[in-house]
Amino acid sequence: MTQKKTVHPYIPNSAPEVKAQMLRDVDASSTEAFYADVPAALRFQGLMDLPEPFLSEYALRRHVEGLLRKNTTTQQVLNFLGAGCYQHHVPAICDEVNQRGEFLTAYAGEPYDDHGRFQSLFEYCSMMGELLEMDVVNVPNYDGFQAAATALRMACRITGRRRVLLAAVLSRDKLSRVRDYLKPEIEIEIVEHDPKTGGMDLKQLEILLKTGSAAVYFENPSYLGCLETHGTEITDLAHKHAALAIVSVDPISLGVLAPPVRYGADIVCGDIQPLGMHMQFGGGQAGFIASQDDEKIVMQYPSRLFGISPTRVPGEYGFGDVAYDRTSFAKREEGKEWVGTAAALWGITAGVYLALMGPQGMKEIGEGILYRTRYAMQEIGKIKGVCTDGFSAPHFKEFVVNFDGTGRKVSELNAALLRKGIFGGKDLSREFPWLGESALVCVTEVHTQEDIDRLVSTLKEVLS
């Protein structure tokens, strides 16, 4: 097999003479020697069908920008999509701070390269703890999906049980991720919803709890935007049967909604994407897990936990890991779960956002979203054949819009809206067929009254 001898400006050591010197230094006849242990049947033979490389930085940039221009983004159209990744305002200072070299490039913030990263993450954890009214918050893991699955595994280790109860109204993507993370040793049971409120069916919950479960998990607000108004009853039932109560929450709601600890949550989790992170085609997510300072819970965190401690110098303090020995960094393959470092930068970003907003700012943004949600539900619900009051519960940021009365499919309506410069709500007909032709519509602080009125008038137009 002959290789093309291309000296590529973006691949280190691609010059033939440099490759030859490296092979001589390790006493190898060719690069093939490095793969001798891989059976020939498993190895690709020949050259990959790839285009010619771009040897000019300008040509490469022009090519990539051409690809990006094919995307239709929220900078071009009015967006009412949410369902787990949200368009919130990102203050410029969030981007300014998280692009600083000492944060952007310092891998995990080890002592030899920590330039304030430990302290920044400690401050983030402290502010999240204040928002959640809990003592312990982890350094972020990958996303809210993993945070939920990890919290459930923690509960199983704490209780010694191998069964968990999940609310029925979950994103099917999240449910799939949780199933993958818990299998094969942890069983999942689904608790049906109350068709009137969208919340959990308390009667079925109590029946299922009687057979022994490690945890009850629900979201507040739910994936469909409903607020669970029976949180205390759910957690009381869980505790009555020696199970833990785990609640996933949208942190941007906590300026106006009671944190889950007030209605009995043992572990709280969620995603911090709303706190200063752009939507990034799936990359701007980071999960959090929180609890009180209870040793039996704290020692089951697989994530890093940062604390503050006095140093040898009087009046000086340092920041770093708490109970480091429980992590996979210390125990490696013997760790409770594997832990990575991919999302620490987003913790710093969320810390900047929370510091900028303060308690008053979080209250104001929460109130603004509540008002917009109610207004959008009210105005869309006035359209003939359209229903927004399928669930009687209060809503935050998202709500279900049913189009069965119009005889039109959501996919058709969304295509028509897009032609007029609007991203409509997420089509729920595949995830939740029992909801009929329904869409999940999202409004945040970025939407003005004029934006919502435009959606309403455009919907009327495409339905006529």
Image (cartoon, grey):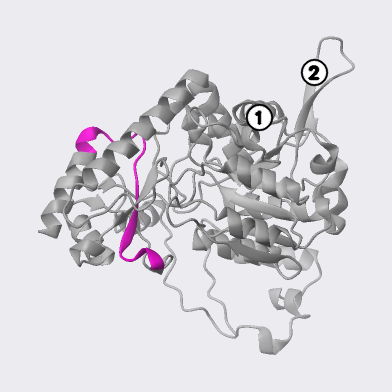
Q: Is residue 253 left or right of residue 455?
A: right
The residue at 39%/56% (across/down) is: 60
The residue lying furthest to the bottom in this view is 41
Percent coordinates x, y for residue 147 in the rendering = 64, 49
**Numbered circles on residues, count:** 2
Percent coordinates x, y for residue 192 in the rendering = 54, 61
Residue 436 belongs to the span the image colors magenta: yes
Name the residue beneath numbered marker 1: 129
The residue lying furthest to the top in this view is 315
Q: Quadrant of the N terminus?
A: bottom right
Residue 380 belongs to the span the image colors magenta: no
Percent coordinates x, y for residue 140 in the rendering = 64, 42
The residue at 66%/44% (across/down) is: 235
**Of labels 2 and 1, the one closer to you:** 1
Q: Quadrant of the C terminus?
A: bottom left
Give the vertical position of 132 relative to 434 (above or below): above
**What stretch of residues is rendered in magenta?**
434-451
Precedes in sequence: disc 2 or disc 1: 1
Disc number placed over residue 370 in the picture, else none: none
The residue at 46%/24% (across/down) is: 363
Q: Amino acid at mark 1?
A: Gly
Name the residue beneath numbered marker 2: 317
Q: Secondary structure at mark 2?
A: strand
Q: Nearer the viewer, residue 224 or 236?
A: 236
Residue 12 visible from this viewpoint? no
